[in-house]
Amino acid sequence: MNRRDFLFNSGGGLGGIALASLLGNDGLLADGGLHHKPKAKRVVQLFMAGGASAVDLFDYKPELVKQHGKAADFGEPVEAFQNGLGPWLRPVWDFKPYGKSGKMLSETVSPLGAVVDEMAFVHNMIGKTGVHSQGTLLQTTGFNRPGFPSIGCWVSYGLGSANENLPTFVVLPDHRGLASNGTKNWDSAFLPAQYQGSAIYPGTKTPVEDLFPDERMKYVTRAGDKAGIDLMTQLNREHATTRPGDERLDARIKSYELAAKMQLAAPEALDISKESKEVLKLYGLDHGKSAFDKEINPIEETDYFGRKCLVARRLLERGVRFVQIWSGNDNGFPRRNWDSHEDVKRDHGPLAYGMARGAAALIADLKRTGLLEDTIILWTTEFGRMPSSQGGKGRDHNPYCFTNWLAGGGIKPATTHGPSDDFGYKPADRKHPTEVYDLHATVLHLLGIDHTKLTVRHNGIDRRLTDVHGHVINELIG
C-alpha cells in the first residue's frame, strides 16, 4: 500500500485530510478522492488561443453549404465584434464521416478520424463575451476577469502531487508567445502560490527558464549551486518564523526545493530521444530534428504541437496532475493563431492539422500505455467563429456557440452532446446551453471531487472554480 492509499484508508473524509496534513501530504484530497470514487487522476487541457471555428473543423452544417454566398439572416439583431456579418460562408474544408460512430470531421483535422470513437463532442458551448482576454480567462479560470485561480491550480490544490520532483501543474505555452492575459491563465491567485502553473518550452535551447546557472557563469558548480539554495532556504525559513501564516514565504521555500529536484527530473522527462521510432513517427517527430532547428523546415505546426503532446504524456507518466498545452499566439501576417478575421483557410489550416496530428497521437499513445483510462483530455478555445463571412474569407468572433471536445478518464466515447442550430450560430436549444462551469464541474466530478465542496474562503466568500454555477453533464460520463 502506498502512502496516499494509507492516508486515505486510515482516515477517510475530513479525518483523512487532517491526517494527511499532519504527515505533510501536499494534497487536499489525496488520490482516493474525498467525495466519491474517481474515474480519472490527471488532466490535459488543449487550448486553441484566438477562437477556433467549430463550423470549419468539427460541427458540420449542410445548411451552410446550401446557403453559401446568400445574405446572412440571423432572425435577430446581432452584435458582432468587428461587424463580420457578411454573407453565409460554407465550411472552407469538406467534411466526411470517420470511425464506427460516423462522426463528421473536416479534412484539415482528419488525423483525429483514427481516434474519433474515443472522443465526446459538445457543440452547444456558450460564452459571455467576444473579447479574447475575458473569454480566455472564463475558460481557464471560470471567471471573465483576473484574480481567480486556473482550473489547473484547483486540481493541483485538490489532489496534490504524485511526484515530488516535478511541478503538479505544468504549462506548455506556444513558442511564439503567450495568449491573452499571459501568465494569469495559470496563476494561483488566492490559492497557495505553490499550485500555480510552471511554464516549460519543449524543444527549445532552454526549456525551463533559470533552472540551471547561465552558461557564461563557468565558476558555478553543482555543489556551489546546492549550497546557495540551501542557504536561501535557511534564511527564508528563519524569516518565515517571524511571519506566521504568510503563504508567499512557504511557496518561495518550496519553489527553491522543487527547482533543486527538477535539475535532475526535468531533463529526463523532457528527453524524447529514448522514445521508440514508432512513437516518434506517431507524433510526427520522425524527421530527427526539431522545427526550432533552422536548418530544416518540416511541417512546423506538427512538430511544435506533436512535441508538446509527447512531452505531456511523459509528464503524466511521472505524476504531473495537470498539463496545459497552448496553440497559437502570433499577430503577424499570415496569422499563426486561431483569430481568423481575414482568411480562415490560410490561418486555421497549419494550426488545425498540427493540432489534430498531435492530439490524435496523444489519445492513441495514452490508450496504448493504459493511461487514457484515467486521463481526461479537454480541448477548448475562448469562443467560436460566426457562420457568416468577414471580408470574404474570414470569420468574426462567435461567443454565442462553439465546440469543446473531451476524451478518456471516464468520458463516454463516441458521444455528441448538445447540438447547435442549423448554421452553428447558437445552440439548437437556447434554453439549455452548455457553459464552461458545466465542463469544469464534470472534470472535477471525474476526478472524484464535488465542485460545490472544493472551496476556499477568500475576502469573506467561499470561492470555487464554478462560482455559483455548474452542473455535471451525466450524458458525457461513461
Image (cartoon, rainbow, N blue to C red):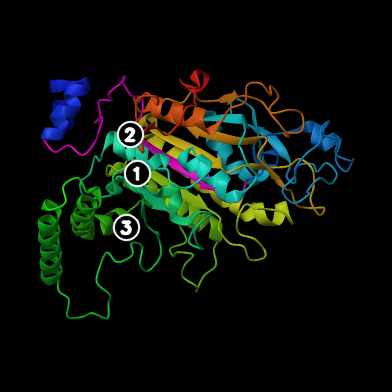
Label 1 environment density (alpha carbons within 10 Å; few <14, some 14–19, many ≥20): some
Q: Which residues are magenta?
A: 23-51
Mark 3, residue position: 271
Nearer the N terminus, badge 2 or badge 1? 1
Q: Amino acid at mark 3?
A: Asp
Residue at 62% from the left image edge and 26% from the top image edge: 433
Mark 2, residue position: 456
Q: Position of residue 353 (x, y in %)?
A: 60, 50
Q: Amino acid at mark 2?
A: Val
* Camera sees residue 248: yes
Q: Position of residue 287 (x, y in %)?
A: 47, 61
Nearer the N terminus, badge 3 or badge 1? 1
The quadrant of the picture occupied by the C terminus is: top left
In this view, the residue in front, 354 or 472, is: 472
Q: Amino acid at mark 1?
A: Phe
The label nearer to you, 3 versus 1, is: 1
Nearer the N terminus, badge 2 or badge 3? 3
Task: Give the dominant element type of the magenta stretch: helix, strand or loop.
Answer: loop
Q: CA distance from mark 2 to mark 1?
A: 8 Å
Label 3 environment density (alpha carbons within 10 Å; few <14, some 14–19, many ≥20): few
Residue 116 to residue 450: above or below: below
Circle 2/circle 1 CB separation < 8 Å: yes
Label 2 environment density (alpha carbons within 10 Å; few <14, some 14–19, many ≥20): some
Mark 1, residue position: 190
Q: CA distance from mark 2 to mark 3?
A: 37 Å
